[in-house]
Amino acid sequence: MKKYVITLSTICISLLVFFQCSLGNRQGILLGTYRKVVLVGSSEKIEASIPVAQNLFWYSSDASTVHVSPSGVIKGISSGSAVIHVRTENSGYKASCHVTVVTAIPRNIILFIGDGMGPEQVKAAGMFKNGVSGSLIFETLDYTNTMTTYSASSGITDSAASATAMATGNKVNNGVISTAIPGDSSELETVLELLKQKGKSTGLVTTTHITNATPACFGAHEYHRSNYDEIAVDYVNGSKPNVLFGGGGFGISDTMTDSVGYHTVTNKTAFESIDPSVYDYVSALFGTDNLPYMYDYPEPDAYPEPELSEMTQKALAILKQDPDGFFLLVEGGRIDHACHSNDLICAIYETIEFEDAVTSALQWMSGRNDTVLIVTADHETGGLTVIKNNGAGNLPDVTWSTGYHTGVEVPIYASGCDENIIFGDFDNTHIYYTISDFFE
Ligand SMILES: [Zn+2]
């Protein structure tokens, strides 16, 4: 079955006008929900089912019922171009719009998460590196937006709840790893697991220890982020990503990944010599904690472990061997740690290395049209505000308001897909829907 992404701008404009006129506050539901439409090439009639806005019904131009998911996936249309009508339960047809195919389904998804990387962290790094804000490579991606990050238990999320939201589309309590809490405590399927089921290879890459909260939410299910031993077991016996690169320790070890068939390395030399075409499963576990800060090794090539950009390159070289495509998560995990200490220079160095990793992915994507790249953050850390740009090579003047996280909306950047991939009011749960909708 072929699947297409179609432009929703026409739909949004017509629905916005319509709902402003007739349904008042429902406008927010639609804008927050139907931000993207995916056409599925099927002529089968499917009953209307609209979980979020229960009293809306959608019809295609031939009057057959179509199905619209909470995130805007439409099924039941036989061609790549159609007129879609929407009506309420009681009042007949109310609006219609024309939709056309623009982009094919992607093969590969690359998701970058800068842990703690709020808008001011990005701004400060651009000023320090290039003398001007807005100048980091990921700020030049095709589409940008901001997104909300609150969790089920707090307006201020931690990395576990935010990564769970992005990985599963569900709001959970702070500290929870892709498990329905609040709720029935069931395991919430992650986007990594979903795409693995679709036959794709998968990878987790981070500068923290690999069992830390952000990668864990994509490949594990635990009541709490501190259950490192159990998270490691979930990796090797459960989700089993093809690529596991990051710090070791905290529940995971080389003997553990070795025993389930990973080609395992634990130092930079062995890492560099990995032939990516030989192995289906590769784990690289450096030390027994987080990787060192970039700022502690400012001289070129002095960094004792592979840098995030090098890990990203190696992961892509391995994952691209799969003709079915891949899902790769890359986390710049220590921006957050530096910001907890209100350590600006350290945060900037980590952000610039994160940018280098995105550059590696963009270079790999060059000339391809089958890969979606999303760059975002899980939350802001430190309450950073830039006061004054002091030019390239100089720290900007800043203030910090806290040693913890804040509820500031974080930036999101995307390329390789239709513009509606990140559209309108955006929440971190929409990362999951944005990706999973391609593959429903
Ligand atoms: Zn933090």
Image (cartoon, rainbow, N blue to C red):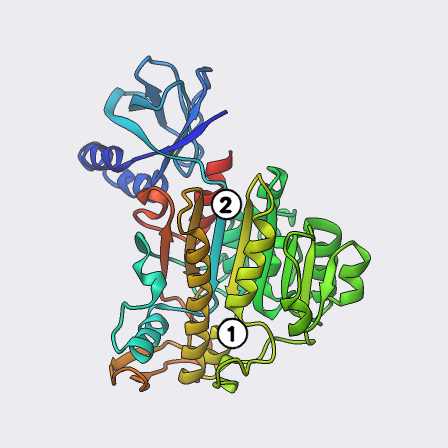
Would residue 234 be found to the left or right of residue 153 on screen?
Answer: right
Percent of width and height locating residue 67: 42, 25
In the image, what residue occupies the spot 24% across and 24% down?
96
- Sequence-wise, the earlier of marks 1 and 2 is 2
Q: Nearer the viewer, mark 1 or mark 2?
A: 2
Q: Amino acid at mark 1?
A: Arg
Q: Residues within 10 Å of mark 1 (few under 14, many from 20)?
A: many
Q: Amino acid at mark 2?
A: Asn
The relative height of residue 115 versus residue 60 in the rendered view (above or below) is below
Relative height, residue 51 to residue 65 (above, below):
below
- Provide the residue designation for mark 2: 108
Q: Horizontal placement of 278 versus 357: left or right?
A: right
287 or 337, which lies in front? 287
Q: CA distance from mark 1 to mark 2?
A: 26 Å
Left or right of 418? Residue 332 is: right
The image position of residue 390, as x and y in percent, is 25, 85
The x, y position of residue 39, in whole percent, is 39, 28
- Of the pair 245 and 123, the residue shown nearer to us: 245
Q: Residue 55: which quarter of the image?
A: top left
Badge 2 local density, few (<14 within 10 Å), some, or many (20+)?
many
Tell me: residue 304, above or below residue 213.
Answer: below
* Residue on which disc 1 sits: 334
Residue at x 23% of width, y 38% of height:
24
Q: Position of residue 278 (x, y in %)?
A: 69, 52
- Using the rendered view, name the quadrant where residue 254 is placed: bottom right
What residue is rendered at 68% in x and 76% in y?
287
